[in-house]
Image (cartoon, rainbow, N blue to C red):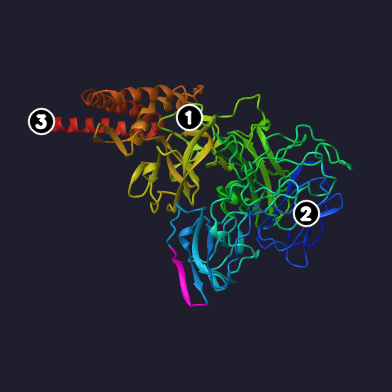
Amino acid sequence: FEHSIDPFSRQTLQHDICLENGREYKFTIFDSVGDGLCPPYSYTLATNGVQIKEGQSYGASEATVFRNGESSPPTPIPTQAPITPAPIASVGDPTAVTIAILFDAFPSENGFRLEDLSNNAVLVERAGGSFTDGQWSSRLYTETVTVTEGNTYRLVVTDSFGDGIFAPGYFALYYGSSATDDALLLVPKQTFPANEAEATITVQNPNGSPNVATTSVPTPSPTNPPVIVPTSPQPTPQPTPSPTNPPVIAPTNPPTSLPTLSPTPFPTATPTPAPTKFPTTPPVTEPTPPPTSQPTVAPTSFPTPEPTQTSSPNTQQTQMTIAIQFDQFPNEIGFQLEDITTGEVVLSKEIGEFSNDQWRDKLYTSTIDIKEGVQYRLSLSDSFGDGLSDGNYFALYYGATTDEEYLLARENDFNSFLANIIVTVQNPNPGGPVPVPTSAPTFILPPTFCFSGQSTVEVQHRGHIPMNQLSVGDMVKTQNSKYERVYSFGHRHESIQAKFLQFFPSMLELSKDHMVFVKKKGVIPASLVKVGDTFAEGGTVEDIRVITRLGIFTPYTPSSTIVVNGVLASNYVAFSDSENLMLGSYETPFSYHWLDHSFQTFHRIWCYWLGFEDQLLESGFSSWSEPAYNIYLAFSEWNIIIQVPLLIMFVNLIALVQVFECLLLYPLSISMVAVLMVYGRISLGTMGKRQSI
């Protein structure tokens, strides 16, 4: 089960659930700020009236694994396999700490330094600008530094813009050379909304145990807790002569490291020839043979789950789709998808990235590549603390789909600052096909032509809508703020997965070959747009990312322009990384935008002026666009000696057809020009006759 509460409510929550006897469970408690429960508040975990765990200042999270029905409580998940203790680091000994910073969207604003206050020295410093936007955006940076046990240090994190690091970003300081969830925290994960934040600590092992920095390689013993907790507080160097917890009459045969083939399903009150619990060989200094991550023979009907920290048996690549149905205030929402096994943040969006105007009451989806069989956590945060309400939700789906038969988990109507769903990636519909296989989309389209379905356009009398809701006949905003009718879609397919370039801050999403209007560069493919360029309409580009979306859309308008996410874009695509048509290595004076617009003249007359409709083919192309694309592919393979005369013939033919289109578009103006030309010719002829007389 999962439950979220308002962190400022000061309420007492008691939740009772029924658990299966003999089965192993993991209880995890999270804190969105990272400081746990402040005294005098605490939490208690109990089973069958026996207290298992009581916790308080646990940092960002704390986990406890227990087996229901045990007579003595298990311990929380150990951070190390049970081994013979090493000497505890003494004051003055060298040790290690690890600085960890999960950046937000603008890491170039951040810097940090670690000061040794005991010796008045700066051990490490990274100035603002050291971390570039794009490369480090929403990524975790770690750096391990050698320090002295017992000395006092100050960690200072800076932000040049003054807005700090926002959730799900954070900074933290770990004891040792690891920054994983099970590492020891000296400075808990925390955000800050200012120019600078600092934390002062004295380096001392928080657990009073050996420095974890001394052994960065895991020991051969499994790190999952033992099935039965030994009764003695420390592991003994030799096995105990009889089973532990609880003491019983020694069995006829001494217990071995392997369970017998027929144990009883649950512990009995009296000894039996077979051990009544999982016989556990107490840890030794050098186990022989080395323990494995799972028992050779499952001793009961409820086998121990496989350790999550090791690789899943099936780690082939697959896909998962994140879906968030926003309420009236999407700018309050941020999320983070995390691989629980490795701690890697797979995808994150900061609070404020979803604007109210663009995403209010809209469905956001994003399909990403992940590993089959691995456990992931999707955490959704709400800055106001009221979550998603009124039937809104966030969910995870298996594959590139939002079909309910592939639903992995969903959280509805949460009303707090933070909510989580945890899933293990497995096909919930094993009898059905995997939606959109990882290897390739349904159709391979070189090049890609389209906008994503989540890009927004402005429709007359309807306002801003997602591209996937746009239809033929809609009056959409185009160049010079004019509204023009969408007469066709060159390409439209809602279930094809494709990669798009995402431009910040406009959030424009289009394929790399699609053309866009850029100041001082003209109408160029999106792949040529750089950070710092300014769109003809839509502002300056601050960051560019590559994303994967489901659905591709290319609407056509009479002017061959369209305003998407406030940016003026072309309806068309470039077939090379240049503004103009390339014939071999020669660049012609004809731009791709002009050539495409000219070639579409026949199509516009057919659909826009005569009112006929296109048909979408199975590939998603229109019945006009697919043959046109195939003609270009054939043209591009011919010799330049053939290409040049064909191009000249095409340009002359198009000139005549465009004159006809101008007559349709501006009949009165063209008629007046023709009358003036005829009148002028007559006047000149009359003047010539008079002069001859």
What residue does disc 1 label?
491
In this image, 40 relative to 150: left or right? right
**Is residue 161 within the magenta segment?**
no
What residue does disc 3 label?
692
- What residue appears at the point 81 percent right and 36 percent down from the top-left corner? 274
Amino acid at pointer 2: Thr
Secondary structure beneath label 2: loop
Place residue 585 in its image quadrant.
Answer: top left
Amino acid at pointer 1: His
157 in relation to 537, above or below = below
Q: CA distance from mark 3 to mark 2?
A: 129 Å
Secondary structure beneath label 3: helix
Q: Which mark is residue 231?
A: 2
Magenta stretch bounds: 118-128
Q: Which mark is residue 269?
A: none
Can you give x and y, in whole percent of width and height, for residue 608 in the image? 46, 28
Can you give x and y, in whole percent of width and height, for residue 239 in the image? 71, 49
If you read the primary sequence from the N terminus, does the residue marked by circle 3 or circle 2 appear first? Answer: 2
Secondary structure beneath label 1: strand
